[in-house]
Amino acid sequence: MIFGTILFIAAAIAGAIATVTGFGIGSVLTPLLTLRVGTQLAIAAVSIPHFFATATRFWRLRSHVNRRVLVRFGIPSAIGGLTGAVLHNVAANRALAIVFGVLLIFVGLSELSGLARRMKFGGPVALVAGGLSGLLGGLVGNQGGIRSGALLGFDLSKEAFVATATAVGVVVDAARMPAYFITQGGDIKRIWALVLVATIGALLGTLFGERLLKRIPEHRFRQVVAVILLMLGVYMILKGGT
C-alpha cells in the first residue's frame, strides 16, 4: 500500500516533468520500480505508463510537431534507440553510463552558458546527432534524456520542442512494447496493480504538466530543460560509479 502510494506520486511528478521537458517518466519510475521487481521487469512494465502518457501528450500537442526536425532527427533517433535497446544487455556497462552522464552535463552547461546557441544542427549533422543520441540512449536505457539534450541544438519553440520529442517517443514505444509483451507478458500481468497505479499517476501528471508548460516563459524554457538534464547527468554518473 505504501509503495503503491509512493509509485503513484512519483508517476504523477514524472508525467508533469515529461510534459515540460519531453522526457522523465522512464528516468523516474524505472529506478523506483526496480526496488520491487528487478531491473528487466521494471523496464518492461514502465513502458506501459510511458506509452499511455506519451501518446496522450502527443495527441494534445500534435499540431506543434516540427515535421522537418521529426524526419531529419527524430527518425534516426528512433532507429538508433531501438538498436541500442537491442544491444543493451550486451554492451551496457557502468563506464557507458558515466559517459552518458558527462554528455548530459555538458549539454546542460552549454545551454546555460550560451554555447549551445552557437551549435545549431541541420542537414547531415541532424541525421548523425539523431542516430548517435538514440543509440547511446538505448544502450544505457534512458533515451528521452539524451534525445531532449540533442534537440536543444534546434531552434524550436517550447511547444514544438516537447511535441517533437514526444512524437519520437511514441514511435519508439510502439516498436519496443510488443517485444516486452512477448518475453515478459506473464510477469507484467503479475504486477498489473502496480502498472495500473503508475499509468493513472503518469496520465494525471501529464495533464497537470500542460499547465506548467504554459506558465513557463519562452525565454526560460530551455534553461529549465538544461537544469533537469544536469540533474539527470549527475544521477547517471553516480549510478555508473556504484
Image (cartoon, rainbow, N blue to C red):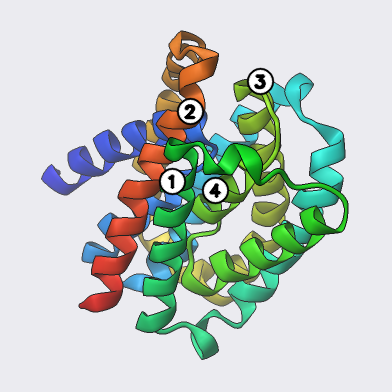
The CA distance from mark 2 to mark 1 is: 16 Å
Nearer-N-terminus badge (1/4): 1
Amino acid identity at mark 1: Gly
Q: Which mark is residue 108?
A: 1
Kindly check if marks 3 and 4 are in contact, taking CB atoms under 8 A apart as contact: no
Residue at mark 4: 149
Q: Which is more foreground, mark 1 or mark 4? A: 1
Q: Residues within 10 Å of mark 4 (few under 14, many from 20)?
A: many
Q: Please state, as top left, top right, bottom left or bottom right, where the C terminus lies in the image.
A: bottom left
The answer to whether 6 is drawn above or below residue 172 in the figure is above
Disc 3, SS: helix
SS category of the residue bearing label 4: helix
Where's the N terminus, which quadrant?
top left
The kind of residue on which mark 3 rests is Arg
Circles 2 and 4, Cβ within 8 Å, touching? The answer is: no
Label 1 close to label 4 by CB (< 8 Å): yes
- Which quadrant holds residue 24? top left
Q: Amino acid at mark 2?
A: Val
Q: Which is nearer the eye, 76 or 126?
A: 126
